[in-house]
Image (cartoon, rainbow, N blue to C red):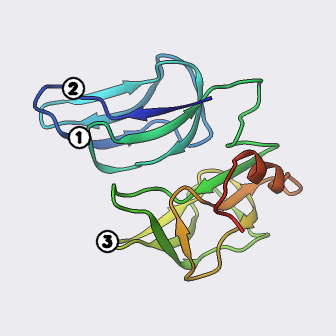
Amino acid sequence: MSDTLRLPRFSEDQDAATIVKWHKKEGDAIKKGEILLEIETDKSIFELEAEKDGIIEEIRVSEGEIKVGEVLAILKDRGNGENEMVKTKNAFAIRLPQLSDAMEEAHALYWRVKVGDVVKKGDILVEVETDKAIIEIDASHKGTVLYQYPENKKKIKVGTIILIIGDEGASVQKLLKESNDTNHG
């Protein structure tokens, strides 16, 4: 079961806040009470804690300003001991993040990696163009690029798995199937 982590209202007159720093990344296991991220309002800096144990399935907004009620991340229950949808036999899915409320799709401009490349955490994987900016998406895990979608300049819908990184031989198809991703090819 998945839950959404939304930006809470810390005061009556607060409409938005700024993400200062994430303390966790996609695929990380979290425990109730752990600090997930720091958020700054016009009055103070708050630490947002996990309300229960689980896994960070997807970080929707990694930095910048966010409105009250907007989804920060998708959290997954640990379920039957597997990190379902995020980690399957040491393979990690990287999805196209939603960078603004209006963003529905983007274009892959320039792939910096290809299937078979070995990457380390922090390596730039692809530059993505939205209607407002060009962003770089970096690797959240080390491993081998096992899957890449789509080809250069093709439109991609928000939430689509764009890359899978993991150990050679990991089951890419199983991860795609378990993710129920209808946007991949």
Dots 1, 2 in contact, CB < 8 A: yes
Which residue corresponds to mark 3?
Answer: 132
Q: Name which of mark 1 and mark 2 comes first in the sequence.
A: 2
Identify the residue at horizontal 35%, vertical 73% (top origin).
Answer: 131
Observer-nearest residue: 15 or 137? 15
In the rendered structure, the answer to whether residue 110 lies left or right of residue 87 reads: left
In the rendered structure, the answer to whether residue 86 lies left or right of residue 57 reads: right
Q: Name which of mark 3 and mark 1 comes first in the sequence.
A: 1
Q: Name which of mark 3 and mark 2 comes first in the sequence.
A: 2
Q: Amino acid at mark 2?
A: Phe
Q: Position of residue 110 (x, y in %)?
A: 55, 80
Identify the residue at horizontal 54%, vertical 44% (top origin).
Answer: 58
Dots 3, 1 in contact, CB < 8 A: no
- Secondary structure, mark 1, is strand
- Secondary structure, mark 2, is loop
Which residue corresponds to mark 2?
Answer: 10
Quadrant of the drawing holding the C terminus:
bottom right
Observer-nearest residue: 120 or 174? 174
Quadrant of the drawing holding the N terminus:
top right
- Please tell me whether residue 40 is drawn above or below residue 136 in the rendered image: above
Q: Amino acid at mark 1?
A: Ala
Query: Dot 2: few (<14), some (14–19), or many (≥20) neighbours within 10 Å?
Result: some
- Please tell me whether residue 42 is drawn above or below residue 60 in the rendered image: above
Query: Dot 3: few (<14), some (14–19), or many (≥20) neighbours within 10 Å?
Result: few
Q: Position of residue 143 (x, y in %)?
A: 74, 56
Residue 177 image label: none
Q: Position of residue 63 (x, y in %)?
A: 36, 50
Dots 3, 2 in contact, CB < 8 A: no
What is the CA distance from the residue labelled 3 to the residue labelled 2?
A: 29 Å
Which residue corresponds to mark 1?
Answer: 17
